[in-house]
């Protein structure tokens, strides 16, 4: 066998300086070999977890698992780190069945395989059993327009209730740096200070929920998550929700992607700015009470889910209940915001 | 320019002004059609409201009634030219009513020809403007490289430059070119250029004994700035760059046009009455009127330019969002409770946590030394960006060794 040709210095991995570089890191444009990329990605998430004291030994923590790339990468990395650094945490997969045929039933199959692959317990809670409505029946009743509002509000409570059922007080979700940067910009455009205040926190022991939420991937770039899943050959489900096409994400996302192109660090820099804003907002404690109907914490008489359900159960077809943008749900849609989302940046090629 | 309605049979009829109902309308102002007279009143009232503090002062006899000195940076763009015009008429009114004025302007144009050969001819522009507005105060042209002249402000923050070279002084123009040329990207250059401008202007304000700087920023520009600074990691400094009042530079900042949209000023300067302002906007040939061919992403566009594009879209259809962003900026309070280790050596603002966590990678986060990348900072074992705020550390990250003037 002829000896391997030496690798020219310019093609060497910038970290180990021995293997050939195969990946240009989207976050820093650093050139890395595959093992170095994987371990850098993992150790950044480890650093995030350690520096924020995110986990305590002996606790049980639920991973909100949709079968998509973010939560699958999260589950895989947490399993790896838990073993490597002996976190001593028991992770459980918690999935929500929204009741969307041709979408959720397929992605749940992925989660079931993940449970076996990662050796984690899996619990599935459905909208049907929690609310008496599946998303299919919601859409049948109100149409596709505005259905994401229902889904978002329902999901937030569903994760909490699923966790409660398991006696778990901490749910980790797959929100990444791109998501957080997008939320920061959207909250600036909306002028939503309460949410601007909390959207960058690594962990929110929310006023509206007894269950803590955290985002271990808050500094991880979406592009690197995709690369990680690819190189680790992870088993994830990549079809878009049939009721919420990708196009819905709109211009804040487009803007983030354009900024990333201009300066790759921009996503991280927006998160950094968001963290500064969080400290610059005078805290106005919002009085919370229990929902008169279901007991969930809320700033109103009825919680959002119950307000929406009331509308559904009164069977007011085609009437979209416009929920006041409160601090509880992560997603709010209204015609105005969809309009803004539709604003295009001028030139071609900006979109990706 | 008259607004037209198209009737069902295809003929066009002028729309009438909603306020006076006599003249034809020139602008659809947030759903109200206005003629040029009524629009002019509207624009003036917005500016005057923000200048409340500078009305003519009536004496308790022992008080100082000499006019207060205000610095107006004039770029010959649409906003600063409009601001000069509005303040000129405010001064005329004060004189007519009281024979005194509440303030006097120091109009300063920063000549940036050192770094941009296509900028308008400063002397010519200044002469024309001065002819139109001869009585507002004093006019000055200052070269951007003049920043090297403020030696008391030069804190010798000179990265990677040896002591001897530092003393040599050298050609300011060349120094400035070298400084900006050393930066790693167009975004960084534009970012630091803005900082240089601000620092020079505040130095000048102090030199000319001005109590405040009157910036021409519109609502739209302030919103752009809010998002651009956010994207550059400068979120912590937004209040200092967008709010009326004391600035960390030792002079007040005021934004008298903060309640007007950029698109409104574009219409305003195009009107023939009361003053044809458009010909005086020497620097605005490609500003704000849709004439400018936008650079595409990836072809040298900067973050600031990207935000300008974004808000052109938003302002057109959703002006309330633009105001929303500025209102949000106004509610942010600079961190008082956080201990300030000191000022950023570059922008001069009280710095945030600093650039120490710039890369936010595992090594930096775990406190190990960073990979020894050469970025010109040879200050021994100090963490990169230790003397800078996060935003400045980001902008000079990867720069060649250079000499920083302040
Ligand atoms: Zn390597
Ligand atoms: Zn309820
Ligand atoms: Zn009128
Ligand atoms: Zn700085």
Image (cartoon, rainbow, N blue to C red):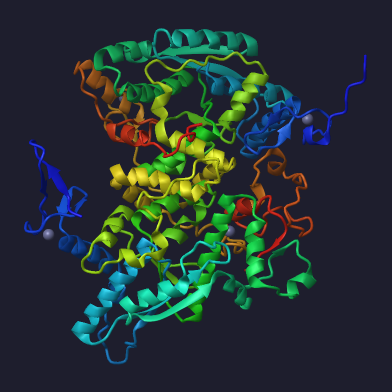
Q: In what quadrant of the picture does the C terminus of chain B appear?
A: bottom right
Which one is nearer the viewer's eye here, A286 or B249?
A: B249
Which one is nearer the viewer's eye here, B400 or B23?
A: B23
Identify the residue at horizontal 23%, vertical 21% (top origin): A311
Determine the residue located farthest toward the bottom in the rendered image. B61
Identify the residue at horizontal 47%, vertical 58% (top origin): B334
Q: Is residue A262 above or below residue A321?
A: below
Looking at the picture, how far across and down is residue A89, in whole percent? 64, 23
Q: Quadrant of residue B239?
A: bottom left
Residue A204, can we see it?
A: no
- The quadrant where ligand 2 appears is top left
| Residue B209 located left or right of residue A35 | left
| Residue A348 located left or right of residue A334 | right
Looking at the picture, how far across and down is residue A325, in whole percent? 32, 36
Q: Is residue A161 above or below residue B184?
A: above
Q: In what quadrant of the picture does the N terminus of chain B appear?
A: bottom left
| Residue B131 located left or right of residue B271 | right
Q: Is residue A234 above or below residue A200?
A: above
Identify the residue at horizontal 28%, vertical 28% (top origin): A302
| Residue B265 located left or right of residue B3 | right
Looking at the picture, how far across and down is residue A205, in whole percent? 48, 35
Q: Quadrant of residue A83?
A: top right
Which one is nearer the viewer's eye here, A288 or B285?
A: B285
Q: Is residue A21 above or below residue B222?
A: above
Looking at the picture, how far across and down is residue B89, in whole percent? 25, 74
């Amino acid at each position: 066998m002829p000896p391997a040709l030496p690798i020219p210095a310019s093609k060497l991995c910038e970290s180990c300086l021995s293997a050939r570089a195969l990946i240009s890191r989207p976050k820093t444009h650093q050139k890395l070999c595959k093992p170095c990329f994987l371990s850098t990605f993992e150790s950044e998430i480890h650093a995030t977890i350690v520096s924020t004291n995110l986990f305590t030994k002996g606790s049980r923590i639920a991973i909100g698992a949709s079968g998509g790339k973010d939560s699958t990468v999260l589950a895989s990395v947490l399993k790896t780190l838990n073993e490597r650094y002996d976190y001593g945490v028991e992770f459980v997969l918690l999935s929500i069945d929204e009741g969307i045929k041709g979408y959720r039933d397929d992605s749940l199959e992925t989660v079931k395989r993940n449970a076996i692959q990662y050796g984690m317990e899996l619990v599935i809670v459905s909208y049907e059993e929690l609310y008496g409505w599946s998303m299919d029946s919601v859409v049948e009743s109100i149409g596709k327009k505005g259905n994401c509002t229902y889904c978002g509000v329902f999901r937030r409570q569903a994760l909490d209730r699923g966790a409660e059922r398991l006696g778990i007080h901490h749910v980790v979700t797959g929100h990444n740096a791109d998501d957080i940067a997008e939320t920061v910009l959207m909250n600036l455009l909306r002028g939503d200070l309460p949410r601007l205040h909390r959207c960058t926190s690594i962990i929110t022991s929310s006023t509206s929920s007894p269950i803590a939420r955290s985002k271990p991937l808050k500094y991880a770039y979406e592009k690197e998550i995709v690369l990680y899943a690819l190189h680790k050959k992870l088993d994830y489900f990549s079809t878009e929700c049939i009721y919420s096409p990708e196009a819905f994400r709109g211009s804040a996302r487009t803007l983030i992607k354009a900024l990333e192109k201009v300066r790759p660090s921009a996503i991280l820099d927006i998160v950094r700015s968001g963290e500064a804003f969080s400290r610059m907002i005078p805290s106005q404690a919002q009085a919370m009470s229990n929902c008169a109907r279901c007991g969930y914490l809320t700033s109103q008489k009825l919680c959002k889910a119950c307000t929406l359900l009331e509308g559904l159960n009164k069977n007011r077809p085609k009437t979209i209940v416009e929920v006041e943008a409160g601090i509880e749900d992560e997603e709010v849609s209204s015609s105005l915001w969809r309009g803004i989302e539709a604003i295009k940046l001028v030139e071609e090629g900006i979109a990706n | 320019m008259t607004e037209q309605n198209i009737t069902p049979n295809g003929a066009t009829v002028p729309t009438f002004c909603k306020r006076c109902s006599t003249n034809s309308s020139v602008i659809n102002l947030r759903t109200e059609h206005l003629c040029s007279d009524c629009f002019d009143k509207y624009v003036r009232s917005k500016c005057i409201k923000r200048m409340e503090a500078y009305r003519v002062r009536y004496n308790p006899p022992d008080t100082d009634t000499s006019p207060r000195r205000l610095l107006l940076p004039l770029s010959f763009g649409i906003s600063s030219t409009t601001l000069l015009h509005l303040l000129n008429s405010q001064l005329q009114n004060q004189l007519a009513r009281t024979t005194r004025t509440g303030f006097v302007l120091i109009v300063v144009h920063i000549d940036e020809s050192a770094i941009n050969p296509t900028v308008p001819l400063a002397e010519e522009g200044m002469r024309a403007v001065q002819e139109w507005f001869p009585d507002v105060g004093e006019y000055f042209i200052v070269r951007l490289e003049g920043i090297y002249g403020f030696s008391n402000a030069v804190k010798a923050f000179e990265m990677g430059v040896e002591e001897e070279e530092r003393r040599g002084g050298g050609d300011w123009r060349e120094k400035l070119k070298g400084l900006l040329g050393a930066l790693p990207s167009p975004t960084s250059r534009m970012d630091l250029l803005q900082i240089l401008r601000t620092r020079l202007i505040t130095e000048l304000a102090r030199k000319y004994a001005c109590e405040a700087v009157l910036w021409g920023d519109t609502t739209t520009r302030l919103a752009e700035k809010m998002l651009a600074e956010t994207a550059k990691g400068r979120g912590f400094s937004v209040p200092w760059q967008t709010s009326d009042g004391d600035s960390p530079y030792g002079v007040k900042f005021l934004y008298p046009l903060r309640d007007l949209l950029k698109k409104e000023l574009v219409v305003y300067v195009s009107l023939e009455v009361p003053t044809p302002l458009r010909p005086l906007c020497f620097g605005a040939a490609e500003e704000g009127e849709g004439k400018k061919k936008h650079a595409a992403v990836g072809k040298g566009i900067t973050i600031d330019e990207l935000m300008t594009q974004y808000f052109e879209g938003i302002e057109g259809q959703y002006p309330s969002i633009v105001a929303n962003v500025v209102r949000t900026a106004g509610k942010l309070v600079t961190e008082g409770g956080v201990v300030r280790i000191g000022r950023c050596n570059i922008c001069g603002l009280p710095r945030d946590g600093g650039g120490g966590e710039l890369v936010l990678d595992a090594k930096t986060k775990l406190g190990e030394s960073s990979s020894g990348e050469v970025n010109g900072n040879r200050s021994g074992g100090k963490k990169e960006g230790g003397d800078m705020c996060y935003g400045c550390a980001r902008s000079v990250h990867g720069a060649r060794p250079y000499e920083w003037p302040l």
